[in-house]
Image: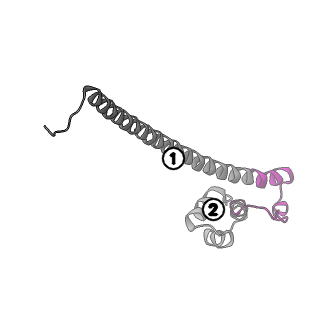
């Protein structure tokens, strides 16, 4: 008999090697699945945070407009004259604050949009909100 002879000890070693191989494969699979799950959670958290940042930016812009409007109203309330509103404005005035000032002085939406670099819709809204009653 010239066949291959395998002992029980060799079969046991072969079985252990196969079991270790499958355990290692299972661990790699679980690790990869965990990373994908964490990756999805992290991606979701980033999207949520980006949405919150965008909302905060909008809120800050709205607050800037309200602050500019309050700053524009304060001299008129204190001195009560149009001459005070015609004083030179600071160089760091935002386009929205400039648009509000122009609307309060009676400028039309086309002029506000052109002078401040705003869209026509933004200019229409600002003029509608801040135009002085006739």
Q: Secondary structure at mark 1?
A: helix
Q: Which residue lies under the disc numbered 2?
A: 127
Q: Is residue 64 above or below residue 92?
A: above
Determine the residue positioned at 43% across, 42% down. Answer: 36
Closer to us: mark 2 or mark 1?
1
Callout 1: few (<14), some (14-19), or many (20+) C-alpha neighbours within 10 Å? few
63 sits left or right of 121 in the view: right
Q: Is residue 85 magenta?
A: yes
The number of callouts visible is: 2
Measured from the top left, where is residue 106 in percent x and y? 69, 66
Using the image, tell me which numbered label, if any, was put on residue 47: 1
Q: CA distance from mark 2 to mark 1?
A: 35 Å
**For residue 56: magenta?**
no
Q: Assign the C terminus to one quadrant of the image.
A: bottom right
Quadrant of residue 127 within the rendered picture: bottom right
**In the rendered structure, which disc, 2 or 1, sits on the residue that comes first in sequence?**
1
Which residues make up the magenta segment? 70-97
Q: Residue at x 66, y 60 (%)?
A: 131
Q: Nearer the viewer, residue 75 or 123?
A: 123
> Residue 57's spot in the image, x, y percent?
63, 51
17 lies above or below 106 = above
Identify the residue shown where x is 57% and y is 68%. 120
Say whether residue 132 is left or right of residue 86. Answer: left
Q: Is residue 73 above or below residue 85?
A: above
In terms of secondary structure, what is the magenta stretch mainly? helix
x%, y% of residue 53? 60, 47
């Amino acid at each position: 008999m010239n066949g291959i002879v395998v002992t029980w000890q060799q079969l046991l070693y072969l079985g252990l090697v196969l079991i270790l191989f499958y355990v290692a494969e299972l661990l790699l699979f679980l690790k990869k699945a965990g990373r994908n799950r964490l990756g999805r959670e992290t991606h979701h958290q980033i999207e949520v945070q980006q949405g919150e940042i965008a909302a905060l930016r909008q809120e800050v812009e709205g607050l800037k407009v309200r602050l500019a409007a309050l700053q524009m109203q304060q001299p008129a309330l204190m001195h009560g004259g149009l001459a005070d509103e015609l004083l030179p404005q600071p160089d760091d005035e935002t386009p929205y604050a400039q648009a509000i000032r122009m609307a309060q002085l009676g400028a039309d939406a086309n002029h506000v949009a052109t002078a401040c670099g705003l869209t026509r819709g933004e200019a229409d809204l600002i003029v509608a909100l801040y135009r002085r009653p006739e």
